[in-house]
Image (cartoon, helix red, strand yellow):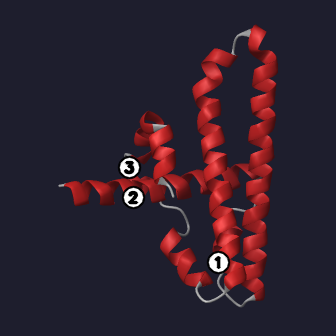
Amino acid sequence: MFEELYHKFPEEVTKNIENKDRLKPPVDLTYLESLVEGNELLENLLKEMLDYCLRYTETALRFQKALEELDNPAKAKERAELDLETKTVHDATNDSINIFSRELAKAGRDNSWVADISSHRAAYAKFVFSFVFYELAKAVNQHREEVD
């Protein structure tokens, strides 16, 4: 799941996963999977949240990569379109996190980790990036161990 992002942006991902411990999000995928086990709705909502987190991270990486090129005034329309796409995906990602959290609470499962990230937009983004890059670092490290 996370490896596809690595293949699309190897340099950017490598830079962002160098210090896995610095990235540690309030929850990791293993813990979230344990929370949804046996509940089909929660399993689907977790998958949806993960898809949005990956999509938002990919959009942000594309934006970061294109920033220099799009600084040209002649590219203002393209930059505005990418800005809008990033904002739209960010909003959808935040919504998916909130929906997942509410359903966890309804099912009597732990959603306390969301309190740390739901204070403002930047906190959501920080969570998404730390979560995605932390999981990527785990996957890359596991792959390296398997190869060695």
Front residue of this view, candidates 141 and 119: 141
Which class describes the residues within 10 Å of circle 3: few (<14), some (14-19), or many (20+)? few
Where is residue 3 drawn, in percent x and y? 45, 52
Q: In the rendered picture of this protein, how many numbered marks are placed on residues? A: 3
Distance from Cα at disc 2 to Cα at disc 3: 14 Å
Tell me which corner region of the image, top left, top right, bottom left or bottom right, holds residue 50: bottom right
The amino acid sitting under disc 2 is: Ala
| Residue 48 x/y as whole percent | 69, 65
The residue that mark 3 highlights is 19
For label 1, count other residues whose C-alpha is less than 10 Å away and answer few (under 14), some (14-19) or many (20+). some
Tell which circle, 3 or 1, labels the residue nearer the N-terminal end. Answer: 3
Residue 111 visible? The answer is: no
Which element carries disc 1, helix, strand or loop?
A: helix
Would residue 126 appear left or right of 74 to someone viewing this image? Answer: left
Q: Which residue is mark 1?
A: 43
Q: Foreground residue, 80 or 2?
A: 2
- Asked where in the image residue 137 lies, by quadrant, the reply is bottom left
Residue 98 appears in the rendering: yes
Q: Is residue 137 above or below residue 102?
A: above
Residue depicted at 22% across the width and 55% down the height: 147
